[in-house]
Amino acid sequence: MYRPVIRLLLTCPLRVGLLLCSLVLFVPNSLGQDAAISGSERPNVIIIFIDDMGFGDVGFNGATGPKTPHLDQMAREGMQFRDFYVGCAVCSGSRTALMTGTHYQRLNMAAVLFPNSNKGLHPDEVTIADMLLDAGYATKCVGKWHLGHLPPCLPTYQGFQSYFGIPYSNDMWIDPANRLADDIVLREGVTLEQLRAGEKQKNQVPLMRDEEVIEYPVDQSTITKRYTEEAIRFIRQHRDEPFFLYLPHTMVHLPLAVSDAFKNRTGKLIWDAIEEVDWSVGEILGELRRAGLDERTLVIFTSDNGAAVGSSLPLRAKKGSVYDGGIREPTVMRWPGRIPAGTVCREVAASIDVLPTLAKLCRAELPQRPIDGHNIWSLMSGAKGATSPHQTYCLTHGPGTVRSGKWKYYPWPEGQSGRKADRSARDHNQGDRPSVQLYDTVADIGETRNVANEHPGVVQRLQAAWEAHNKELSANRRPAADLIRPKDALSPSRPGTPGRRSNSNVAPLDWATVEPGKTYPSSSVANLVKQPFTLTCKLSGDLASGVVVAHGGTLTGYSMYLHDGQLTFAVRQSGDTIRRVSLPLRPASDWTIVASVTPTAIRLKVNDNRAEVWQGDGRLLRHPAEDLSIAFDSKMPVDPKGPTRRFDGTIKSIRFQID
């Protein structure tokens, strides 16, 4: 596992532009400057993230084709953000930015992942779900994930207690490594033999629950309706506790599909799909009102990028472009009594700001690793004189762009000019354009008049910010994760822990076969999120010391070790929260050790006469990302106070059980 970056280096800039960009990059959470939140109740949080919905696809932004009465009502009851930017002009990069508060390039994520991709979001990164789960929230993802479709990158490895949805874009295909549920529903004449053959069929995608495929190919005409029903069930189940629901809809991405109730309503399939998404929003808001949760729930609605089929007007360009039509999204935030109704925010805000803002509102801990977002509660609450925390918002997707106040700047990457620059523009759906562009987005929302020659000082300042941003980003990248793809093709689930589903697409670990000095994939161990478990070991050896077993690393996990005549069982629940129980080892020919984690205690017992108990919930809040190691710790230690040496005694047996 990779050690978190915990220091930020502030250097004295030589130019004002560098200073401005440094402030944006290195001060991600100006919590103390925001308006106070009255009352002590933390909000429930619902994020509705539409796929490929453009700025001009909603009534509150002037749409004249599709009817969006529920979104328009949401806008009247909340705050519109007219200058809200996502972190990428296409799918995976945008979702990375939202979920982590961090530019996707910093995390080495691809702009778009595919079923044959080998990388995904590293589970060591802290998502909104990780953060809120640690803070005591129930968490669920319903919809399109697209940050890695195999362990250790699935939603259930990223802070979500449960998942229901399509793991990537609906125009893709199924990966032969996906794991099938025993009761999978096969449609359109597909057989298990065809699945095992791994035949690539575009537009035929799987529906997953947690880590298993439950339907293939999914009936896309029912997907918006089924997502909505699943979301409402979650709200009802958790109405008496704080919850976080992430609802990234599959629609209105191509291929478009709608349920029978919305077919042929408007004469255009894209408008039908938009109206069904609007209906879904109405159902969610209606459930909140019926459940008495309306004033206790923050709902954020936005899109992952600009329109592919619909309208991004009056903005320029569409999906894939870093002109505003590709990255400036229709956005509403609603929290009755806290966010002023019927208001409009015209300050620059971004999807990377959602995580640090929720940390403030939900009294959760920010990630230790540097992020790029800022707390924008002062904007959301309508605080007098509140301004954007982004003096410059740099986005490096494609040729890149910088937004600063009313200005939108388009630099070329260093060393590009003339025909080479024009070719790069065409490759990124930008069209032919001059080497430098500057637009006044207040006077010219459609970015039609390039005023770069009229404002050389602005160009110089934003070019300096752009260069500083790219230099810092390149110097501080963090790794993506490798997807775990077994050698065998698609296969039905194998038996795991009785009564529980395994969390992996590889065979569940047989603990009776583990050997000292070897490691085993974390994904082969049953899902440990909020699960009680018992570890039983039989050891021998005079004055034995060292690590007996370790599973996890610097973010979460457990380990057992002997040091200075003491036996210790350590459970790292998250970050620096480590629970330890220890016992002295009395001389004996061998020791039978039982360590257990429960909702009320961590217990340690040696032979039959001694036991030590730590009172409190010791269960893990996320599944360990690092491999299981026997008789040593293969990478970063779970417990920094423990020994680093291998166990020099004899491990006669190890048994593990989820209770």
Image (cartoon, grey):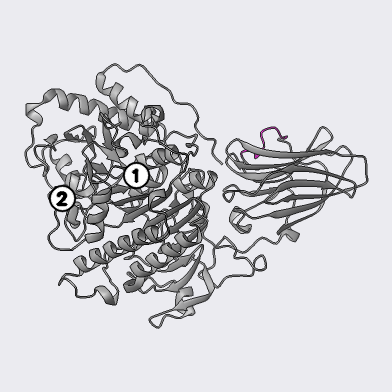
- Magenta residues? 636-643
Label at residue 317:
2
Q: Secondary structure at mark 1?
A: loop
Q: Where is residue 294 drawn, in percent x and y? A: 38, 53
Contact between labelled residues 1 and 2, with CB atoms less than 8 Å apart: no
Label 1 neighbourhood size at 10 Å, few (<14), some (14-19), many (20+)? few
Q: Secondary structure at mark 2?
A: loop
- Write the residue at 18% across / 60% down: 310
For the stretch drawn in magenta, the main secondary structure is: loop
Q: In this view of the protein, can residue 258 be seen by the observer?
A: yes
Q: Where is residue 459 drawn, in percent x and y? A: 16, 27
Q: In this view of the protein, can residue 483 be seen by the observer?
A: no
Instruction: Work out how far the residue at label 2 is from the one at label 1, CA to CA, in angstroms.
Output: 37 Å
**Which residue occupies the extreme bottom position in the image?**
189
Task: Please give left or right for residue 14 compared with residue 624 in the image.
Answer: left
Residue 144 figure quarter: bottom left
Q: Where is residue 530 drawn, in percent x and y? A: 61, 53
Residue 639 part of the magenta segment: yes
Residue 108 figure quarter: top left
- Write the residue at 48% across / 69% down: 213
Q: Where is residue 84 drawn, in percent x and y? A: 25, 43
* Residue at which label 1 appears: 337
Sequence-first tag of 2 and 1: 2
- Write the residue at 91% across / 39% down: 586
